[in-house]
Image: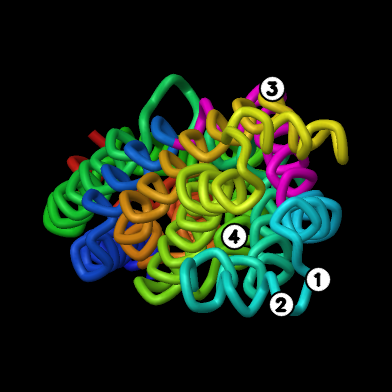
């Protein structure tokens, strides 16, 4: 029985190492780690305090311009063109349908954009937790490779120990098991992995269709602002026998959010949101890869085998201490 007891830790090491390897390769943890590193690098500038504050400010600027045009802007343009608002909108429907469609879609687009920015603001702390994984100065890719290396090492030591059990190997496995349990706990993995999964859950399902919806919304707002400045304003100026600059001045007088400065800020914001939409397209496949294995599952894949190794190591060392004189002398060499 003592022989079996001494070999217990080696059997557990073999099974644990094999499990780490099987899960690692089956779930492509290295590829997921590489994708996670790229995702963290790309998202970090956006999810800083300054980045989020800029997003919120620019979204507010865009919403103010859109709302101002939908209300005082339309009434001002209609008055300058000598028409009431329904007649003016009917003309726009024929001449610049993209502007009218943009006005119709504006409330939904504003709600969509606010939801995106609000979620990023709410999840900033969780992103910081995710970015801190796996700790100890390792990248996610390096952490995944380390997990596979540990699995291979446990398999090798387990096989060797089953054939030639050594007390020194059992002690090493016991220490490894303790490290596999204590390390993740000391590095705050329970909180960090829970935050990571909550962040990824908030983005699901981040599909190609969702990215396309953002592109469509961006194109709609771009067409609205472009049509306003380059087609509607010149057309109203011609109807009022004045200049486009005079019409723009009238719009600014009607609402400060339609001033040249406000429109310039809106153009800058549109450039930034265009970058974010492209960013969405870049990170979408990365997010799919990083969700191959939940972060908490990755933690338990380390902690549970570590706990099993620790328990088995204690049992095996106890068997060595209680060995009988007739036991083989090379067993504890």
Q: Is disc 4 in contact with disc 1, using a CB cutoff of under 8 Å?
A: no
Image point (53%, 43%), residue name: 229
- The outermost residue toward the front is 241
Spot occupied by residue 242 in the image (x, y as percentages of width and height): 62, 37
Is residue 323 rendered to the left or right of residue 264? left
Q: Which residues are magenta?
A: 43-66
Mark 2 highlights which residue?
87
Quarter holding the C terminus? Answer: top left
- Few, some or many residues within 10 Å of mark 2 (<14, 14–19, 20+): few
Mark 4 highlights which residue?
197
Q: Find numbered disc 4 in the image and state the secondary structure of the residue it sits on.
A: helix
Image point (43%, 54%), residue name: 316
Spot occupied by residue 159 in the image (x, y as percentages of width and height): 15, 56
Mark 1 highlights which residue?
84
Q: On the image, which quarter does residue 115 sit in? A: bottom right
Image point (87%, 40%), residue name: 254
* Gap between marks 4 and 2 measured at Cα: 53 Å
Question: Which comes before the other along the chain, label 4 or label 3?
Answer: 4
For the residue pair 312 and 112, the one nearer the viewer reads as 112
* Gap between marks 4 and 1 measured at Cα: 54 Å
């Amino acid at each position: 029985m003592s022989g079996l007891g001494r070999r217990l830790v080696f059997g557990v090491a073999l099974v644990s190492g094999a499990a780490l390897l099987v899960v690692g390769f089956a779930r492509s943890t290295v590829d997921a780690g590489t994708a996670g590193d790229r995702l963290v690098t790309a998202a970090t500038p956006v999810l800083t305090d300054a980045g989020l504050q800029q997003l919120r400010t620019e979204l507010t600027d865009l919403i103010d311009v859109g709302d101002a045009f939908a209300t005082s802007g339309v009434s001002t343009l209609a008055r300058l063109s000598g028409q009431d608002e329904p007649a003016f909108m009917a003309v726009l429907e024929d001449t610049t349908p993209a502007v009218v469609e943009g006005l119709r879609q504006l409330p939904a687009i504003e709600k969509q954009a606010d939801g995106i920015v609000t979620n990023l603001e709410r999840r900033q702390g969780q992103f910081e937790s995710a970015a801190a994984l796996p700790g100890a100065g390792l990248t996610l890719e390096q952490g995944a490779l380390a997990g596979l290396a540990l699995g291979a090492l446990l398999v090798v030591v387990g096989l060797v120990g089953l054939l030639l059990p050594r007390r020194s190997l059992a002690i090493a496995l016991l220490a490894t098991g303790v490290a596999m349990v204590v390390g993740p706990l000391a590095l705050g993995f329970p909180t960090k992995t829970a935050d990571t999964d909550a962040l990824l859950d908030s983005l699901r399902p981040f599909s190609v269709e969702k990215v396309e919806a953002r592109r469509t919304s961006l194109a709609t707002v771009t067409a609205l602002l472009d049509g306003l400045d380059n087609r509607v304003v010149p057309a109203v100026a011609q109807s009022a026998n004045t200049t486009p600059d005079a019409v723009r001045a009238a719009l600014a007088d009607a609402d400060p959010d339609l001033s040249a400065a406000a429109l310039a800020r809106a153009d800058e914001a549109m450039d930034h949101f265009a970058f974010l939409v492209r960013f969405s397209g870049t990170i979408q496949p990365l997010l799919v890869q990083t969700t191959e294995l939940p972060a908490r599952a990755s933690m338990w894949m380390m902690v549970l085998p570590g706990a099993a190794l620790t328990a088995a190591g204690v049992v095996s060392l106890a068997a060595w201490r209680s060995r009988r004189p007739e036991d083989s002398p090379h067993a504890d060499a």
